[in-house]
């Protein structure tokens, strides 16, 4: 064990009324990939903000030693000057600018007072080669996928002579292939002597790549695992993160499955803009009462598009296909129709399209079926309050009152509000798109419990998820989706990740059970 | 929720009202007191209050419609031109075609609805930004006004003038005051008391939610009844023949109706939903296009009404009518606490915002400030009011109210959920 590249000693950071970090120490050895794990709100991002100067010296207690010298960063420029570059979860590219322009934004190479674009392009190609990005440097940032945008961000870090690269949830928005590429890249950087700190929720990735793992919980460092000594053990990490044993990550559940009541046949939808592109091709599926049905597929496979087009044609252009509910064919032309017919869709991006962030809890809960609290044309505020209170109690939404604004709730509790909003519409079929994305382990467990309760009430539930263990642990039956087609149907008993993955990546239709 | 936020909510009502609105009530009082002193009591005389009401009723009517347009996430630059266009059409129809004046009013409202529907069609169904549609409308209907009126003024008959220059008539025993105005004031007091009682009853039906302490209700009622009674006697006690203006009554009815609509009906809530997050609203079953169409159509109707009231007040329709009204209406809405990005704002806030601008304008004129300086001061005031609000939001507090309320605070503020620093920024009252 050589000298530490970075040593943060007894960092304490307080916000008015909250201690975000309390006496946290972190030692990072040169050339390591150091993972930081913890539930949402554990203090991971705050720690990185202290390190990178977003929270300047003086606003926290404790000391930072970097390359053996004490550092007092006044702002993010100071830390970047020292070679510490942080890449945030939300990418900071200008969509209408080219890759080159983005790479040198604020740092443009100049010659005789004007920008030297030839030199810049040349240097851009070099940087892009470093991160394995194979694109024309004149391509606009908006025209490349999220995965490649992430690579541009990393290349940008190289343009600044990075020594210590900090990545905040780098793979959260990436699909499997892009994630794997990114992890390979980090391994490559290690050879070049670049040290990385990675914040991640994805424990399998942490396990695969990290040399050391520091676990934070409630603003304290619980332990640092050196992988070479003791190995990375997912259970141990989870235990550290939540402070208890998670015997099972899914609540016990005995399904009580009834008859098929919802059926979609030969569903075909084309892309809203390009007329030739079919996003759903002859997809057919069924849901039984009391059944939890999973949709597995890679990002871009068309799961969300399928769900949204069924939910009142809220995506794409409907070309063909029928919906049969309770033995009768029904026509759903709008979201209002869908709600009237007992359908509910909980979107994957609750902040962008699931909630009105200006609303408080009570108005959010009733938003999708105001007719239920309308008496003679007038909204009944007392009824609204009672309904919201009911869901606050039964779903255990953590909020001081239902008058609270939804932005002040944590991700898990916001998700519960969205679930409440759709449970309030008395649906027969709930489509949940990535219901546990971005929420922590404890809240996930509760969401699973809610999903199971809904099924026990005789409702059908469709769960769309990118996390295969989640689908396998939760669903009674799983469909695999690939390029807009349903490629397989697998019973819970036969489901394993390899089989699912195979069907998620091939058009060959297989059937089991 | 801290005691301070509770108090703010108790005293000023509604959770969607926000800090800027509270601040504006204080600002309004301060401005009135300031000018009352500076003008040696001229500001709050019967004559001035009546004139003020007549002068600003039509702007306030516009700001009601504008509030809904802005809450839905749009803007309307055409209202002044639409008002002028409707004014000339109605004036011509009455004086030259011999249409009876009540039918003229109906015609005006119809013209407004058609214009609103025309603009709503482009905004809602074609998807042209309202800024562009109404910029075009601004030119279109200004030109239309001059085309129809040959850039001339067209007078309107006596009966029509009632809606702009009329007063409540004198009836009943001689009390030294205008009896109908007195009755109106008393009715308003009764309505305020009933509303407070009703709100308390609703709150009591919500188990677990404690209603505001009784003394808070009492204080609030006392203040409101006091203000209403004071205004009643001023309006009723003016020069004989004058009393509460008819345009003021039209405004009051509209304020009550639209406040109720925006706060207490599904349709009203849909406007806020569309402005807050259009996609989320759509996925909750809100018919986006319909809401946008109706909001623009409604703006057309209110602009037409404002135009007719103005024509009635000035006894004739002219080519310069309604010039820059859109700016006054927009300023009133933003001073009244609406968000530029939509989704936030209240009818009552916009009325207070309009009143602030009106009193400022009127007071400056009374103390003999030139028109140039009045404009400069109004411009700076608008900028300052919104900038202060933006600044306070960044600080995550509202200092004016905060300092006023601090003596009432008895318990430490609630500890917010632990998270990163950004959480503090979201810690704003009323959002």
Image (tube, coloured by chain):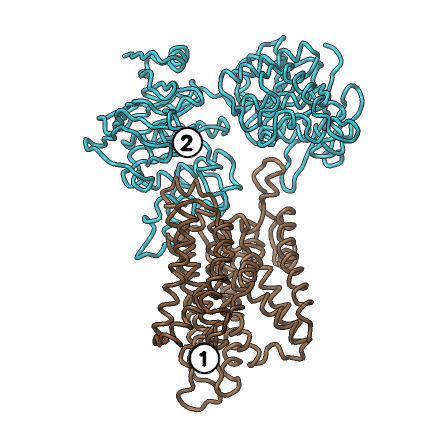
Chain colours: A cyan, B brown
User: In x, y percent, where is residue A494?
Assistant: 33, 12
User: Which residue in the structure is indicated by mark 1?
Assistant: B166
Instruction: Kindly identify the residue that appears in the image at 43 percent across and 81 percent down.
Output: B168
Image quarter of residue A499: top left
The local crowd at label 1, few if under 14, some if 14 to 19, many if 20 or more residues have their Cα within 10 Å, is many
**Residue A82: assigned label:** none
Do tag 2 and tag 1 residues touch (Cβ < 8 Å)?
no
User: In x, y percent, where is residue A198?
Assistant: 61, 21
Q: Nearer the viewer, residue A239 or B301?
A: B301
Residue B256 visible in the picture = yes
Q: Nearer the viewer, residue B70 or B82?
A: B82
Gap between marks 2 and 1 measured at Cα: 57 Å
**Residue A273: assigned label:** 2
User: In x, y percent, where is residue B98?
Assistant: 35, 77
Looking at the picture, does residue B288 appear above or below residue A21?
below
Image quarter of residue A347: top left
Whether residue B356 sits left or right of residue B122 in the image: it is right
Mark in the foreground, 2 or 1: 2
Mark 2 belongs to chain: A
Looking at the picture, does residue B196 appear above or below residue A68?
below
Residue A382 visible in the picture = no
Instruction: Kindly identify the residue that appears in the image at 19 percent across and 31 percent down.
Output: A327
Whether residue B165 sits left or right of residue B389 in the image: it is left
Q: Nearer the viewer, residue A499 or B131?
A: B131
């Amino acid at each position: 064990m050589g000298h530490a590249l970075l040593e943060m000693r007894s960092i304490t950071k307080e916000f008015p009324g909250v201690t975000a970090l309390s006496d946290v120490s972190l030692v990072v050895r040169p050339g390591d990939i150091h993972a930081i794990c913890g539930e949402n709100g554990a203090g991971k991002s705050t720690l990185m903000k202290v390190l990178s100067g977003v929270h300047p010296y003086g606003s926290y207690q404790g000391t930072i030693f970097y390359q053996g010298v004490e550092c007092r960063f006044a702002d993010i420029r100071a830390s970047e000057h020292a070679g510490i570059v942080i890449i945030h979860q939300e990418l900071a590219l200008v969509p209408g600018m080219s890759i080159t322009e983005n790479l040198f934004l604020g740092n443009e190479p100049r010659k005789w007072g004007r920008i030297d674009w030839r030199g810049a392009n040349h240097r851009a190609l070099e940087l892009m080669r470093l991160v394995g990005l194979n694109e024309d440097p004149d391509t606009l940032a908006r025209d490349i996928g999220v995965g490649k945008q992430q690579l541009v961000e990393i290349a940008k870090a190289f343009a600044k002579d990075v020594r210590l690269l900090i990545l905040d949830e780098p793979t959260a928005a990436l699909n499997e292939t892009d994630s794997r590429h990114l992890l390979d890249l980090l391994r490559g950087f290690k050879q070049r002597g670049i040290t990385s700190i990675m914040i991640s929720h994805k424990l399998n990735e942490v396990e695969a790549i990290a040399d050391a793992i520091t676990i934070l919980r409630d603003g304290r460092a619980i332990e640092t695992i050196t992988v070479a000594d003791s190995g990375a053990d997912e259970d141990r990490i989870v235990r550290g993160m939540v402070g208890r044993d998670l015997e099972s990550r899914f609540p016990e559940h005995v399904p009580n499955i009834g008859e098929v009541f919802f059926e979609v046949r030969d569903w075909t939808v084309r892309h809203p803009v390009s007329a030739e592109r079919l996003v759903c091709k002859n997809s057919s599926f069924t849901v039984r009462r009391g059944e939890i049905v999973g949709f597995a597929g890679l990002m871009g496979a068309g799961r969300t598009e399928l769900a949204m087009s069924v939910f009142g044609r809220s995506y794409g252009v409907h070309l063909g296909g029928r919906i049969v509910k309770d033995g009768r064919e029904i026509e759903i032309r709008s979201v209002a129709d869908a709600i009237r017919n007992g359908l509910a869709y909980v979107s994957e991006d609750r902040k962008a399209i699931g909630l009105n962030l200006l609303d408080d809890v009570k108005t959010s809960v009733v938003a999708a079926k105001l007719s239920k609290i309308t008496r003679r044309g007038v909204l009944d505020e007392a009824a609204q309050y009672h309904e919201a209170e009911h869901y606050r109690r039964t779903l255990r939404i953590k909020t001081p009152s239902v008058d609270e604004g939804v932005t002040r709730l944590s991700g898990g509790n916001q998700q519960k509000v969205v679930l409440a909003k759709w449970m309030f519409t008395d649906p027969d079929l709930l489509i949940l798109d990535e219901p546990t994305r971005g929420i922590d382990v404890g809240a996930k467990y509760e969401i699973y419990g809610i999903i199971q309760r809904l099924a026990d009430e005789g409702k059908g539930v469709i769960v769309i998820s990118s996390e295969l263990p989640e689908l396998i642990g939760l669903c009674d039956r799983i469909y695999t989706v690939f390029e807009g087609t349903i490629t397989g149907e697998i019973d819970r008993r036969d489901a394993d990740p390899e089989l699912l993955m195979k069907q998620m990546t091939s058009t060959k239709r297989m059937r089991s059970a | 929720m801290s005691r301070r936020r509770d108090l703010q909510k108790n005293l000023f009502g509604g959770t969607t009202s926000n800090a800027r609105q509270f601040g504006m009530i204080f600002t309004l009082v301060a401005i009135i007191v300031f000018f009352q002193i500076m003008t040696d009591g001229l500001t709050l005389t019967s004559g001035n209050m009546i004139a003020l009401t007549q002068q600003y009723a039509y702007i306030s009517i516009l700001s009601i419609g504008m509030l809904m347009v802005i809450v839905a996430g749009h803007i309307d630059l055409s209202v002044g031109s639409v008002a002028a266009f409707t004014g000339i059409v109605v004036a011509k129809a009455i004086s030259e075609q011999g249409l009876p004046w009540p039918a003229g009013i109906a015609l005006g409202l119809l013209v407004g609805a058609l214009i609103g529907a025309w603009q709503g069609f482009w905004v809602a169904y074609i998807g042209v930004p309202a800024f562009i549609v109404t910029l075009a409308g601004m030119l279109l209907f200004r030109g239309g006004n001059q085309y129809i009126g040959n850039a001339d003024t067209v007078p309107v008959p006596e009966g029509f003038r009632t809606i702009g220059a009329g007063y409540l008539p004198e009836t009943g025993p001689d009390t030294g005051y205008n009896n109908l105005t007195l009755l109106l004031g008393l009715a308003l007091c009764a309505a305020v008391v009933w509303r407070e009682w009703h709100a308390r009853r609703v709150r009591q039906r919500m188990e677990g939610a404690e209603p505001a302490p009784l003394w808070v209700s009492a204080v609030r009622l006392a203040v409101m009844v006091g203000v209403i009674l004071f205004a009643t006697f001023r309006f009723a006690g003016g020069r004989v023949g004058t009393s509460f203006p008819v345009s003021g009554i039209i405004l009051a009815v509209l304020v009550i109706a639209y406040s109720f609509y925006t706060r207490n009906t599904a349709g009203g809530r849909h406007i806020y939903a569309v402005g807050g997050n259009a996609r989320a609203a759509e996925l909750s079953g809100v018919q986006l296009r319909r809401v946008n169409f109706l909001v623009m159509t409604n703006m057309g109707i209110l602009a037409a009404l404002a135009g007719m009231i103005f024509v009635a007040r000035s006894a004739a329709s002219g080519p310069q009518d309604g010039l820059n009204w859109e700016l006054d209406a927009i300023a009133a809405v933003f001073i009244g606490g609406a968000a530029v990005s939509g989704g936030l704002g209240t009818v009552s806030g916009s009325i207070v915002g309009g009143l602030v601008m009106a009193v400022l304008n009127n007071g400056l004129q009374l103390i003999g400030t030139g028109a140039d300086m009045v404009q400069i001061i109004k411009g700076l005031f608008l900028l300052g009011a919104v900038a202060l609000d933006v600044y306070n939001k960044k600080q995550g507090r509202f200092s004016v109210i905060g300092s006023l309320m601090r003596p009432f605070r008895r318990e430490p503020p609630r500890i917010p959920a632990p998270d990163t620093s950004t959480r503090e920024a979201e810690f704003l009252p009323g959002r």
